[in-house]
Image (tube, rainbow, N blue to C red):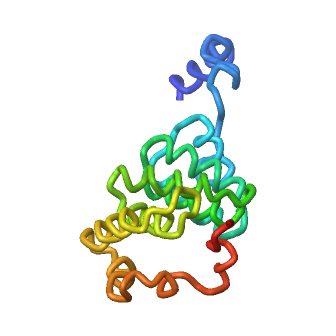
Amino acid sequence: MRNIALVLALWPPALPAFAESAADLGTLNPDEMTWGSNVARAERGEVDMNICASGYMMTKSGDHGSARTIFEACAKAGFTGAMTWMSQLDNNGLGAEYNPDATADWDRRAAELGDPVGKFNYGLDLMRGHGVARNDALGRQFVDAAAQDGLAIARRLQNADYDLDEVTPDADDWKYAPLF
């Protein structure tokens, strides 16, 4: 009992010596698992697989602007899945204007890094001349590489003798029609 009294008697005067301001401690109790915190981390270039995966939820919920922020940062860090998502956003005008050139560029970058979906998509871009000069032979090579990597839809296209209607809904015909 006597020790407790001694501690209580000494504690209040000693408190200012140990006190720190909140500013000295940084952000107290930060939002760690929110979309906003993921976007802020991506803006700072702090990306990992979890941050990159959150872009999927954002775009599926319709928050394409936040998804773009996440996917662009993840693509810059070398995540090929984020590159294919950027292609999808640009190909559909989600969070920005429809941009076939950017679509093909994202697909090419993912393909060059070995991503099977990137290979397949870039092959389609080349075969259609969508965002890139048309080159049917090179496009088939990319589709074949994706099929060799085990991508089922690439094998499906091969089995359909590279008939693009096999993998593209007719609702998108306007997008892939020749411009001249």
Is 58 on the left or on the right of 160, as rendered? right
Residue located at (45% from left, 53% from top): 108
Residue located at (63% from left, 70% from top): 178
Q: Nearer the viewer, residue 168 or 77?
A: 168
Residue 137 image-quadrant placement? bottom left
The quarter of the rendered structure image containing the C terminus is bottom right
Q: Nearer the viewer, residue 107 or 161?
A: 161
Q: Where residue 66 sits: x, y (%)?
A: 68, 53
Q: Nearer the viewer, residue 67 or 83?
A: 83
Residue located at (32% from left, 81% from top): 155
Q: Where residue 8 sits: x, y (%)?
A: 62, 23
Is 52 on the left or on the right of 174, as rendered? left
Residue located at (51% from left, 47% from top): 74
Q: Where residue 130 sits: x, y (%)?
A: 57, 63
Q: Is residue 51 above or below residue 14?
A: below
Residue lying farthest to the left in this orientation? 148
Q: Where residue 119 sits: x, y (%)?
A: 38, 62
Q: Is residue 53 above or below residue 177?
A: above
Q: Is residue 50 above or below residue 170?
A: above
Residue lying farthest to the front in this orientation? 180
